[in-house]
Amino acid sequence: MEKETKTKKINSAIFDLITKEVEVETTFIKALPGFSIVGLASSAVQESKERIKAALLNNDFAFPPLKIIVNLSPANLPKNSTVLDLPIALGILLQNSNIDLSEYLILGELGLDGTIKETPDIFSIVLGSKYKKIITAKSIADKLSLIPGIEVYGFENISEFFNLKLTKAKATKINAKSIQINNKKYYYLNKFKLDFKDVKGQKNAKRAALISAAGMHNILFEGSAGVGKSMIINRLRYILPPMSLEEILETQKINALENKEIDFQPIRPFRMPHHSSSKPAIFGGGSKGAKMGEIALSNHGILFFDELPYFNKDVLENLRLPLQEGKILISRVNNKIEYNIDILFAAAMNPCPCGNLLSKKECRCTDLEIKRYKNRISEPLIDRIDLYLQMSEDDDNSTISSKEMFKKVLIAFEKQMKRGYFNARLPENWKFDIQKDAREILDKAILNFNLSKRSEFKILKVAQTIADLENYDKINKKAILEALNYRKRT
């Protein structure tokens, strides 16, 4: 028996923490007229049948008196995204045409009048896709064009496909300042929504914050209530180093998933989960569909734990591996996903449960209560934190602006990018250029304080950042002494 029509294949994809490719196969067969979608399509995808029918009929497309079967391959992968509307519609519309779309990834939701709409997951799908040519909604095409190495073609309505004319979208420009290091551009803003000049006093804490920002070092402030711990960390975001295009795109991917505006501003993420947050909320997961946790959402930026000891013990202990390895694994029964993370972990805590131990107020806590409170944070976790500072109330009125601090960060950033790493991310076999007298001081400290190899390496990384900030050619005695000062004494 002769076939009525051939099978039309259209490339698409869905996003479930990572991009998963989907092939949309459409065929017409001789049978009672109907429209069915197979291949583990969710109710959202099944409802697309009505949207597609209305969109095509409202644009003068005549459905043939045949049964339409759409297969979403691979058939064992659950499909739950409305971006499949457009590829399914094109599979029907172009069934008998000779137009070849095999090189294109097609994504978009349809309105009843045939309007092609963007969805929050399109940006994430394209970032993770292997395809270099994209057909999607015109409303997001210019933004997608900023992704290097791809061509994006935007359409407003399904009717435009009756006479297919491809017009390449123009890339959105990043409205920010930039510097070029080793033939690579890095972007930054000279705008400081929260400014360090508002923080009166706390000269040592602001110095620690500067070192943390310059080298992307993890930091912990301990001090009485109201001393300025959170105030300083909230301002840390605006003096962090410039961002590469890849980092900006990754950040915008997260914004898109959270239904935030994609603006391509080079501002690093800042996440501040409450201490009552569950383990899945911090690390990601879920019984039905895995979702990103706070660690993933803070990638390339700051994850801030205020009131650190009050976080669940299981959360704190499970934080050790991501901070050490820069990776996180989300495991489900049928799926395991591992991805890299790069965060600056910042934390703040009181010196005791009542918060008055280091203040002028009277502390109401017993020695046992203080011991239990501090024992909630294990030594292995503390060992992952590069900078520790105990803050006290002071009457110093000295100020420094975020703009002044950021100028110093830029100097240190350029030195680090010429090496290829932030100082906090230096590989374990890195050879530091350290003066002889500085090395002797560090060796004495290792002996006297019984420091581990990890602690030694942490001190050297902080000392390297101090040397970069002060424009020293080598790690000298002054840099080592200051780095040792930020070590938590037990």
Image (cartoon, grey):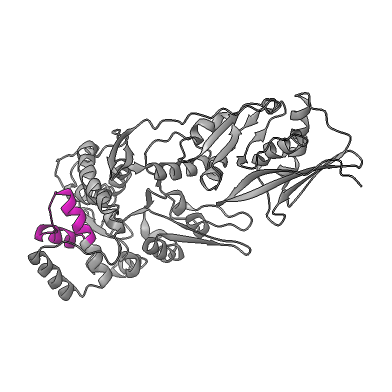
**Left or right: 327 as drawn, with respect to 335:** left
Residue at the image point whose x is 49% and y is 53% from the top: 293
Residue at the image point whose x is 54% and y is 30% from the top: 168
Residue at the image point whose x is 48% and y is 28% from the top: 170
Residue 428's x, y, as percent?
A: 29, 66
Q: Quadrant of the C terminus?
A: bottom left
Q: Is 25 in front, or is 99?
A: 99
Residue 116's x, y, as percent?
A: 64, 30
Q: Which residue occupies the extreme left position in the image?
A: 437
State the predominant SS element of the stretch in magenta. helix
Depicted 105 relative to depicted 339: above or below: above
Where residue 185 sits, quadrant-wise, is top left
Q: Is 376 in front, or is 190?
A: 190
**Left or right: 20 as drawn, with respect to 56:** left
- How many marks the image carries: the answer is 0
Q: Is residue 463 magenta?
A: yes
Q: Which residues are magenta?
A: 461-486
